[in-house]
Amino acid sequence: MSVQIRDPRFGDVVGEDAEIEQIATGFGFTEGPIWHPEQHFLIFSDMRHDHQRRWSAADGVSTYRHPSNKANGSAFDRQGRVVSCEHQTSRVVRIEGDGIETVLASHFDGRELNSPNDIVVRSDGAIYFTDPTYGRAREDIGLLRAIEQPHQGLYRIDPDSGAVGLLVDDFWQPNGLCFSVDERKLFVNDTPRFHVRAFDVAADGDVSGGDVWAETLDSNGEKPDGRHPDTPPGMKPDGMKVDREDNLYVVGPGGVHVFAPNATCLGVILVPEHTTNFAFGDADFRSLYITASASVYRVRVKVPGFAAF
């Protein structure tokens, strides 16, 4: 059994007998998985090896981009292009069809960004990303250097002008983020606090609110010390997505935590390595592709996720 059930509704959303399988391993630090809904392949980051890799059932693992500037989170935009957060360069870039990189964001208010971490694209083309300091503090997943920004923020790139705007600046370390099904809510987690916060999204893309919506707790109802350096990745909130019924999946202690739309934790998909992120995939979007330490895993669920574009 690869699950920990905390509410009977878990069986309807994930399944009581969900089993996890390892589909690839031998990497340095996996992150940022995204699934191509038409060509049916997975792109994910291998940060310590400075790669973005491609996996498909037919071809296995190959190189998508190297060097990747220690890319972390990625997303497809509405034209099917990859947009990625780079820890080593403090940039958000778009990979064009010919492989050329277009820089979408690198500075705010005259200073370099910290280390853009995770990213989502709204249906109007606006790009939202988080900017913690992790890539400036660790050589293996970034580049050691001084912090220039006075905050760890949530940003929006305007789809028309390309302007970079700061939306929220009161996080300790913002990380995973995702929209609700109707895009009226934006969920952003604050990793050291174990918080998942919910923001209201206005028609113009601005956000308000930001109350704590849920916390990712362990099986004892507790949370480890999120600021302690010995608390490993995969024990704190990280990657986050919703399925088509607005159940929210978020990395937390033990694996992937699943919350009902009313913020009740239904249970946890248990992962044998420290978990970082995941993406819904396969033709029916009922497979969860999970990045965890040196491996990528897959588990089938009952409620499908979304196509990316």
Image: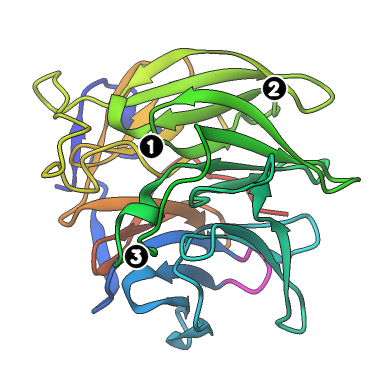
- Along the line of sight, the residue nearer the viewer: 284 or 210: 210
The mark found on residue 184 in the picture is 2
**Labels 1 and 3: the sequence-earlier one:** 3
Look at mark 1 in the image and give the residue it sits on: 250
Q: CB under 8 Å between callouts 2 and 3?
A: no
The kind of residue tagged 3 is Thr
Q: Nearer the viewer, mark 2 or mark 3?
A: 3
Distance, label 1 to label 3, CA atoms, is 16 Å
Location of residue 129 by image quarter: top right
Query: Eyeballing the image, is 222 above or below 125?
Result: above
**Looking at the picture, which amino acid does disc 2 mark?**
Arg
The percent coordinates of residue 245 (x first, y second) are: 55, 29
Q: Residue at x 51, y 43 (%)?
A: 131
Q: Residue at x 34, y 23 (%)?
A: 9
The reply to whether the C-beta atoms of the residues labelled 1 and 3 are less than 8 Å apart is: no
Relative to 172, 26 lies left or right: left
By secondary structure, the bulk of the magenta-drawn segment is best described as loop
Element carrying mark 1: strand
Magenta segment boundaries in residue numbering: 36-40
Question: Mark 2, residues whose alpha carbon is within 10 Å: few (<14), some, or many (≥20)?
Answer: some
Query: Which residue: 37% across, 42% down?
Result: 238
In the shown orientation, is residue 58 left or right of residue 5? right
- Looking at the rendered structure, the kind of residue marked 1 is Val
What residue is shown with label 3? 30
Q: Is residue 57 above or below residue 141?
A: below
Q: Is residue 246 visible?
A: no
Residue drawn at 51 percent across, 70 percent down: 43
Q: Quadrant of the C terminus?
A: bottom right
Mark 2–mark 3 Cα distance, whole angstroms, equals: 30 Å
